Image (cartoon, helix red, strand yellow):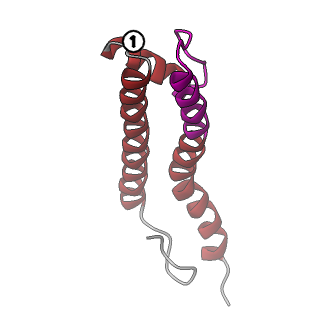
Amino acid sequence: MFEQKTEPLLPTKDFAKRLLRSFLVSAVMILSALIIGAVGYSITENLNWIDAILNASMILSGMGPATPMQTTTGKLFASGYALFSGIVFISSTGVIIAPIFHRLLHSFHADVEE
């Protein structure tokens, strides 16, 4: 996916495309997690879609649930979804940062001639 150490630094236009692709992948990851959370809250807590999306958004953003969970199943889902949301956050951050970090490290190798 990324250029090798011996290859020249990617042109700025191509790097911008790579960065945009990373943002899109990250957005799809977050949107997928939001859908999973909304469906889960709708099923386990019998919430309407607006409240389910609100709860999923709040958990995904790290704020905590908007409405208290009433059922044991809902509480277990909220617990698992909170852990899942943390992993999604870390993963999506990594997807966004990877091209930037790679370009920075690659620029160090581009200046050195062997």
Q: Is residue 17 above or below residue 71?
A: below
Magenta-colored segment: predominant secondary structure: helix
7 or 60, nearer to the observer: 60
Residue furthest toward the front?
A: 72
**Residue drawn at (53%, 12%), measured in percent from left and top?**
70
Element on which disc 1 rests = helix
**Residue drawn at (39%, 12%), measured in percent from left and top?**
51
Residue furthest toward the left?
A: 49
Location of the C terminus by quadrant is bottom right
Q: Is residue 101 above or below residue 20?
A: below
Q: Which residue is mark 1?
A: 51
9 or 43, nearer to the observer: 43
Q: Does residue 49 appear left or right of residue 94 in this picture?
A: left
Task: Find residue 87 and report its horizontal and vertical position in percent.
Answer: 59, 44
Task: Find residue 9 and report its horizontal and vertical position in percent.
Answer: 50, 70
Q: Which residues lie in the magenta part?
A: 59-86
**Circle 1: residue type:** Asp
